[in-house]
Amino acid sequence: KENTVQFVRQLPSARLLGQSCQLGISGFVGEMSSGVTTTVFNFLLLGLAGNVAVAAYGVVANFALVATAIFNGVAQGAQPLVSECYGKSDCAGAKKLLLLGSCTALVLAAVLYGIIFGFTDGLVGVFNSEHSAHMGMRLYFIGYFFAGFNIVAAGYLSATNRPVEASITSICRGMVAIVACSLVLSRLFGMNGVWAAFPASELLTAALTLVLLFRGKKQKA
């Protein structure tokens, strides 16, 4: 009798479901992006150098999945803290968390690239005795200096109820920019162009993300 919670029959609301899904679009696209990148890269590398190049990308992709998971962890760890600040209308605190998350991502990217650059042959040798992915590892992982910021920023945008900007960032880095850069750079520079497509697409996305962040700041002002 003291229970104040009651179950009632309620038809599903398409509007509420849509609103709930909006904030998850960026995460969904982020998960999908690895499949899109793998498919595009495999087709391009197969045409350029055959199975050896595809095997090399397999090595790069294995380490890239681990690296991406690290930066996703930073973004997901910061999200609830940013959401708490946003709920309290503490814009300064949310921005401070974005700065801390971005700096953390940059430091992790530097450490990660130092390991990749210093132990390239040893890491590649775990999967491929021919070391065909040597140059690919060194070029591809430059992109994490920008990818870390993009992943953290997309999480920040979602946590501050800006699903459109978060989706734009995720779609750009996960599909549009990476496909465009890989097609153009592979035509210009061959295999090295394919490896460089990831850092180029992340750099372009980082520039776009900065524009979105500053645009939101001006609108609130």
Image (cartoon, helix red, strand yellow):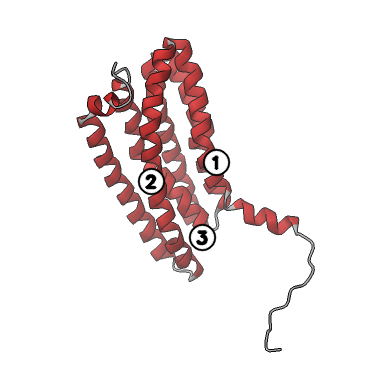
**Marked residue nearer the N-terminal end (3 or 1):** 1
Task: Decide which of 142, 32 is in the foreground and name it.
Answer: 32
Q: Which of marks 3 and 1 is in front?
A: 1
* x and y percentages locating residue 89 in the rendered image: 48, 69
Q: In which quarter of the image is residue 119?
A: top left
Which residue is depicted at the point 55% across and 58% down?
161
Task: Decide which of 98, 123 is in the foreground and name it.
Answer: 123
Report the residue marked by disc 3: 220
Q: Nearer the viewer, mark 2 or mark 3?
A: 2
Task: Decide which of 13, 185 is in the foreground and name it.
Answer: 13
Q: Is residue 166 above or below residue 192?
A: below
Q: What is the secondary structure assignment of the residue under circle 2?
A: helix
Picture disc at residue 72: none
Report the residue marked by disc 2: 71
Q: Is residue 175 left or right of residue 151?
A: right
Q: What is the secondary structure assignment of the residue under circle 1?
A: helix
Q: How far apart are marks 3 and 1 (CA)?
A: 27 Å
**Label 2 is placed on what type of residue?**
Phe
Q: Where, quadrant-wise, is the N terminus in this rendering? A: bottom right
Which residue is depicted at the point 35% across and 37% down?
144
* x and y percentages locating residue 117 in the rendered image: 23, 30
Graded by Cα atoms within 10 Å as few (under 14), some (14 to 19) or many (20 or more), the crowding at tag 1 reads many
Q: In which quarter of the image is residue 130?
A: top left
Q: In this view, does 12 lie above or below 8?
A: above
Residue situated furthest left in the rendering: 118
Graded by Cα atoms within 10 Å as few (under 14), some (14 to 19) or many (20 or more), the crowding at tag 2 reads many
**Label 1 is placed on what type of residue?**
Val
Picture disc at residue 29: 1
Q: In this view, does 164 lie to the left or right of 102?
A: right
**Label 3 is placed on what type of residue?**
Lys
